[in-house]
Amino acid sequence: MPPCSQQVEDGVRIDRNFINNEFLTSDGDELIAVVNPATGEQIAQVPAASAAEARAAVEAAAQAQKAWRRMTSIERANQLRALADALIARKDRIGQILALESGKSVEDATNEVVYAADITRYHAEWARRIEGEIVPSDSPDENLLLQREPIGVVAALIPFNFPVYTLMRKIAPALITGNTVVARPSNNTPCSALEIARAVKDAGFMPGAINILAMSHATAQTVCTHPRVGMITLTGSVGAGRKVLEYSQVNIAKSSLELGGKTPAIIAADADLETAAAAVVASRTSHCGQLCTAVERVYVQAEVHDRFVELLRQHMEACSFGDRARTPSHMGPLINANSRLNIHQMVERAIDDGATLQTGGYIPEGPGFFYPPTMLTNCRQDMEIVQEEVFGPVLPVLSFDRIEDALDMANDHQFGLASVVYTEDYRTALRLANNIEAGEVYINRTPADPYQGYHAGWKRSGLGGDDGKHGMLEFTQTRLIVQSY
């Protein structure tokens, strides 16, 4: 009887890594403790894959890729559809596990599984749409053909904030284009990914096409620098992105990086202030602000500044926080204690630097890694709280006089992932949309990353991107065929 993906001992899950369609039986030399951030209690442990196991995963993926790439794209699409069906069949189980390890409500976590199945089906639809080109030759008796080809083995590094959705966001386009995958989930949230591995088995996937392993940073380096890895795709911090670029130099592997963000929201005087305030606070407090495209700084036109600040304060103070397993409407916890401490220290430094605390700004007593919705006014453009990604429910607010001033401040930044504009004047909207330095612009709404679009950052927010046709094509390379006759 093959080993199960997990067992329970003394109330703690023990999960197993997944290579070549089998769950490993070894416990390894290092165990990764998985903690419920809402309670601080350990809920699971996962053996960290050894370097030898990581190499075995890459070799299994490389061997499978030889056969996987020879399948017709429609055959690969059928496998992806079967995987989407298997995800839906297991959505309640995966959702329960994700809720425990992330602090999300069961409803939100289960919905994330549904969205993961949706994006898997979306990429399956590209099967008959991966196109090449015919290019005119300078010779009359010659054809020039450009084909799209898979890269080979893809190393996918997955973050903690949307670990189920992002896993399929990477895996699905890699697979439909003929690649195979070795995925490393975040060590904060590995259990949902390993539960997805069971769905991979349910779907009858070719052994080795999808491999999922929890691992240390050192072992992740072993994967990323393996000579058979042709591409590394990451969603993570700028620091993690720099590491991946170092790894990619070893074998000149392709990199696709979705990194940090510091989304500006520009609130013009003619905006619907009530709608804008509610949306900005919802964006900032969703998943405790742990979204790369969530609003991270607000620029408000001076004539409506005080009124808008009061609306923001009211909405933030109306947002309660706590264990979402008990009260799903609450804002949940940060992912761990270090994250909370770092965010609180940033708030304290901002206050010391002259910012005014409007609400929040303290570490609550009791279990879990909660932090209240926090707003700071009288901020300056050069403050750390305005320049650095917070990744928590903290909102610095700045004032501007002219729209041109807001544009200058929004663009005076290292990041360029997403941006938000609230105005009722289409001229203002177009002027800002056409000049803001960001990969995404949302007018009169907050970011949502439609998967048929293209999620790609400018500046230090990344290289390459995810979603849509262009995200799918990131996982391909071109071959020129010259036919003389």
Image (spheres, helix red, strand yellow):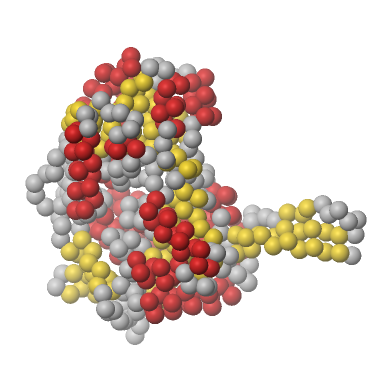
Q: In this view, does 164 lie above or below 407?
A: below
Q: Is residue 220 left or right of residue 228?
A: left
Q: Which residue is drawn at 67% across and 55% down?
A: 131
Horizontal side of residue 207 vs 88, given as left or right: right
Question: 343 or 371: which is nearer to us?
Answer: 343
For the view shown, which residue lies furthest in the bottom direction? 1
Can I make out residue 83 in this image?
no
Q: Where is residue 87 in the image (x, y as percent from the top left)?
A: 40, 61
Does residue 379 appear in the picture of this structure? yes
Residue 333, position in %: x, y?
Answer: 21, 48
Residue 145 at what x, y percent from top left? Answer: 76, 59
User: Is 480 drawn above or below residue 424 in the view shown?
Assistant: below
The residue depicted at 20 percent of the width and 43 percent of the height is 345
Q: Could you tell me which quadrant the C terminus lies in?
A: bottom right
Left or right of residue 271, residue 208 in this image: right
- In which image quadrant can residue 377 be found? top left
Instruction: Count how many numbered circles sit on residues in the image.
Output: 0
Q: Which of 270 and 323 is in front in this view?
A: 270
The residue under the point 43% across, 77% down is 55
The residue sitting at 45% across, 61% down in the picture is 246
- Whole-percent x and y of residue 222? 42, 72
Which of the two residues, 22 or 431, is positioned nearer the viewer here? 431
Q: In which quarter of the image is residue 200?
A: bottom left
Image quadrant containing the N terminus: bottom left
Q: In the picture shown, does residue 232 fall above or below 425? A: below
